[in-house]
Image (spheres, helix red, strand yellow):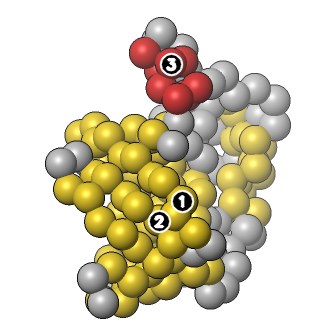
């Protein structure tokens, strides 16, 4: 299957072919390699490439995917063919109604950038959470009004914990 990965604002073509259970052929630009991939926890994976082992956690945060390892974390957007077509046509997924912002992984709230009653714009930073020694600014997926703030700076949060509600 072909994907488009957006990393640091740059687009990269990725093709992934399943060879056998847990074994994949991956083409990233002009580079191709085989990898053994195993899920070892709810959000944790182990991958072996060229006899080298890598461990990482993967979590969704809205449209983005957060990949965290010992060396830090990276945010990327991955689009399959349907999402690429919609993106090329200039369509963006509309978010409406009540939105609950939850923690993508365990961490600590560094700063809450909004308060209940505040009006926010789509893509406006609303909270900063530290996870895996990296600070991640979480952005509002839609314009609206902050109706609840469930956390404070310095508070520990668990994966999936409700932090902010926007309507």
Q: Which numbered disc flags the more N-terminal residue, 1 or 2?
A: 1
Which residue is at a point 52% across and 64% down the rendered structure image?
Answer: 19
Q: Which numbered disc flags the more N-terminal residue, 2 or 3?
A: 2
Check disc 2: other Cα within 10 Å, few if <14, some if 14-19, many if 20+. Answer: some
The residue where tag 2 is placed is 24
Circles 3 and 1 in contact, beta carbons < 8 Å: no
Q: Which numbered disc flags the more N-terminal residue, 3 or 1?
A: 1
Where does the image place residue 33, in percent across and percent down from the top left?
29, 65
69 left or right of 57 in image: left
Where does the image place residue 14, in percent across and percent down from the top left?
36, 46
Evaluate whether residue 165 shows in this view.
yes
Q: Residue furthest left?
A: 30
Q: Residue furthest right?
A: 98
Circles 2 and 3 in contact, beta carbons < 8 Å: no
Where does the image place residue 113, in percent across and percent down from the top left?
50, 53
Q: Secondary structure at mark 1?
A: strand
Q: Secondary structure at mark 3?
A: helix
Where does the image place residue 88, in percent across and percent down from the top left?
43, 15
Which residue is at a point 52% across and 29% down the rendered structure image?
Answer: 81
103 left or right of 35 in image: right
The residue where tag 1 is placed is 18
Query: Where on the picture, by quarter, is residue 71?
Result: bottom left
Q: CA distance from mark 2 to mark 3?
A: 25 Å
Circles 1 and 2 in contact, beta carbons < 8 Å: yes
Q: CA distance from mark 1 to mark 2?
A: 5 Å
Q: Quadrant of the C terminus?
A: top right
Which residue is at a point 37% across and 58% down the rendered structure image?
Answer: 26
Q: CA distance from mark 3 to mark 1?
A: 23 Å
Check disc 1: other Cα within 10 Å, few if <14, some if 14-19, many if 20+. Answer: few
Evaluate whether residue 5 shows in this view.
no
The residue where tag 3 is placed is 85
């Amino acid at each position: 299957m072909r994907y488009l990965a957006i990393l640091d604002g740059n687009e990269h073509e990725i093709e992934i072919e399943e060879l056998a259970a847990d074994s994949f052929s991956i083409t990233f630009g002009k580079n191709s390699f085989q990898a053994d991939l195993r899920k070892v926890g709810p959000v944790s994976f182990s991958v072996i490439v060229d006899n080298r082992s890598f461990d990482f956690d993967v979590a969704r945060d809205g449209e983005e995917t957060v990949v965290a390892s010992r060396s830090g974390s990276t945010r990327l957007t991955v689009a399959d063919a349907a999402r690429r077509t919609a993106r090329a046509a200039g369509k963006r997924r509309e978010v409406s109604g009540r939105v609950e912002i939850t923690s993508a992984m365990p961490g600590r709230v560094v700063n809450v950038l909004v308060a209940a009653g505040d009006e926010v714009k789509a893509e406006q930073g609303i909270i900063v959470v530290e996870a895996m020694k990296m600070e991640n600014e979480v952005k509002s997926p839609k314009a609206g009004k902050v109706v609840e703030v469930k956390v404070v700076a310095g508070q520990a949060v668990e994966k999936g914990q409700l932090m902010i509600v926007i309507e």
